[in-house]
Image: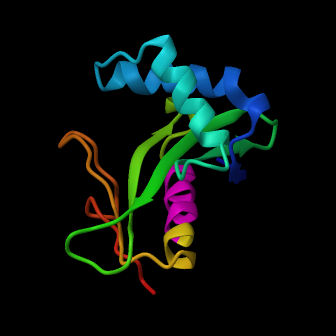
Amino acid sequence: MASVTIRAVEDKDKEEWLTLWNQYNNFYKRTASEPITDETYERFLSDKIRMYAAVAVAEDGKLVGFAHWYPHASTSEIEEVVYLHDLFVDPSVRNGGVGRKLIEHVKQYAKDLPAAHLYWHTQVSCSLVGCGGACANDG
C-alpha cells in the first residue's frame, strides 16, 4: 500500500465503514444486529462516550481499514489502560503496513492519555508480525 492516512472516523464514513465492519464480523463468524451496529457507530461519534474509531484512508479516498478502542480503569494499574477492541484491514491491501499504522495510531493515543499500557486479544489464527499479540506503551 503506497500511502494511507489514519484519522478519526466521521459521520460521512458510515457506509464504507459498514462494508469493512461486515467483513470483520464475517471473519469472526459473528453477527452484529443493525441496532448494535448503529449504536456502536454513534458511540464513536459521541463526545460523551469514550469509545473511539480510526479509519485508514487510501490515496483514492477509499476506507481500507479501521481500529476501535477504549480506555478503562484497571484493577492492576493506577493509570487507565487502553483496549484495542477491533482491528481490520481490507484483504486487498493486507501486508502493506495498514494494520501497523492503525496500531501505531492507537498506541499514540495510549501514550498521550497516558495509559499504563495498550492491549488486545485476537484469535490464535491471527498473527501480527512483530507485535507478539500485545504492544506495551513504550513511553
Check the image and report above or below for 136 versus 92.
below
Q: Residue 6: horizontal and vertical position, in percent?
A: 68, 53
Asked whether 50 falls inside the magenta stretch, the response is no
Name which residue lies at 49% across and 59% down. 103
Taking depth in this image into account, of 77 and 107 the one nearest to the observer is 77
Q: Residue 64: horizontal and vertical position, in percent?
A: 62, 36
Q: Residue 36: horizontal and vertical position, in percent?
A: 46, 21
Furthest residue in direction top, as rendered:
34
Judge from the rendering whether residue 125 lies leftward or rightward of residue 57; answer left or right: left
Name which residue lies at 49% across and 70% down. 110
Name which residue lies at 30% across and 19% down. 30
Q: Tell me where residue 45 sits by quadrant.
A: top right
Magenta stretch, residue numbers: 96-107
Q: Main secondary structure of the magenta part?
A: helix
- The answer, for residue 5, to whether it is visible in the render is yes
Asked whether 98 falls inside the magenta stretch, the response is yes
